[in-house]
Amino acid sequence: MPDIQVLFTRYRTYFFYLLALFVLGWGFTSHKTIFAGLILGTCASFFNIWILYRKTWQLSEAVKNGKTLYSLGSLSRLASAALVILIAIRFPDYFHIFSSIIGLLVVYFIILLDFLITGINEGRQQEKR
């Protein structure tokens, strides 16, 4: 299993490339609300994966030291998703609600993309052996 820090570094890279594409879409197209919603949801999605990374790291340190950790930050991640939806509902002229929801789901697409890329690369390495 890959180290959690290596995974988070790859995920962060994917997030920043995707956010750059969304910002370019926001800046150069007429669909400002859609791309603003994608940006808002993706930022919250990145915040959620960062919280999960940090809590997982704290859990591994607690296990090493024989301590316990009582939460993995589920409430914080749920609250950030709810905040994104509330912002999109409150300001429909600036943020598209469905694109904000899609932005919240970006983390799952990134995890799937990373799984596929690493699986293909590992398959190629095994064929060479």
Image: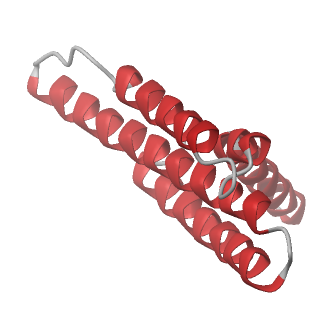
Horizontal and vertical percent position of residue 77: 44, 31
29 to 113, vertically: above or below: below
Q: Residue at x 72, y 70 (%)?
A: 22
Residue at the limit of the structure toward the bottom, as seen here = 28
53 to 60, vertically: above or below: below
Depth check: 69 or 19 in front?
19
Looking at the image, how many numbered discs can be counted on the residues?
0
118 to 112, vertically: above or below: below
The reply, left or right, for residue 91 in relation to residue 114 is left
Colour mapping used in the image: secondary structure
Horizontal and vertical percent position of residue 59: 26, 28
Quadrant holding the N terminus: top right
Depth check: 123 or 73 in front?
73
Depth check: 56 or 121 in front?
56
Q: Residue at x 23, y 35 (%)?
A: 58
Specify the quadrant of the image occupied by residue 85: top right
Specify the quadrant of the image occupied by residue 129: bottom right
Q: Residue at x 65, y 58 (%)?
A: 94
Horizontal and vertical percent position of residue 124: 86, 61
The reply, left or right, for residue 55 in relation to residue 82 is left
Q: Residue at x 61, y 53 (%)?
A: 42
Horizontal and vertical percent position of residue 108: 70, 40
The reply, left or right, for residue 99 in relation to residue 13 is right
